[in-house]
Amino acid sequence: MNTSIVIKQETVDSDIATICSGIRPDEWDTDNEMESYDETALHEYLSHEDNILLVAYDTDEIVGLLLATKIYLPYARGRSNWMYVDELDTKPSHRRRGIARSLMQRIIEIARDRGMSEVYVATERDNTNARVFYESLHPAETEPAIGYTYKTDRTT
């Protein structure tokens, strides 16, 4: 990874306005599902200690990010809590520089330090680049999963 890249775990005390203004979907991918980050929503997200935002900076520019949350399970004593990576992304201009790998390595370290037994991440079947990347990290297992999304009648 480029030595000018710094990965920081952001907290509720971070400069949330600057983070939100630095994550600009129009600069990342037109095909990406990334949306503009809302200051109030990000503050609320970071207010929960089980939620993690890792941000990769190249000087002051945000070039990568990872969102993860701790999942509590009521079974498998001794390994019942694990980390779920909800989003991992790198700005196109900074891809293939080891940023995503460093973000994943950092979240695995955080999970281990917090006593969690696993880090789980999923991607779409047709997202070949992501699948190749995740395989390159030598996962303990690969699950043939299909995700389902159910909309509630809540419109907000």
Image: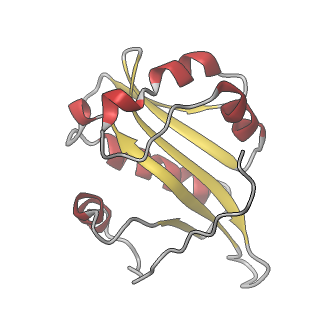
Residue 133 percent across, percent down from the top left: 27, 59
* Most foreground residue, 40 or 62: 40
Rendered-image quadrant of the C terminus: top right
Q: Relative to 34, is 87 above or below?
A: below
Q: Relative to 125, is 49 above or below?
A: above
Taking the spot 24% from the left edge, 36% from the top edge, the residue there is 92
Residue 127 percent across, percent down from the top left: 28, 62
* Most foreground residue, 113 or 120: 120
The tally of labels here is 0
Picture quadrant of residue 46: top right
Residue 67 percent across, percent down from the top left: 54, 46
Q: Relative to 31, is 143 above or below?
A: below
Taking the spot 51% from the left edge, 32% from the top edge, the residue there is 36
Picture quadrant of residue 38: top right
Seen in the image, is 16 located left or right of residue 6? right
Seen in the image, is 139 located left or right of residue 135? right
User: What's the coloring here?
Assistant: secondary structure
Rendered-image quadrant of the N terminus: top left
The answer to whether residue 156 of the structure is visible from this angle is: yes
Taking the spot 72% from the left edge, 23% from the top edge, the residue there is 13
Residue 4 percent across, percent down from the top left: 30, 22
Seen in the image, is 80 located left or right of residue 150? right
Taking the spot 48% from the left edge, 44% from the top edge, the residue there is 66
The answer to whether residue 15 of the structure is visible from this angle is: no
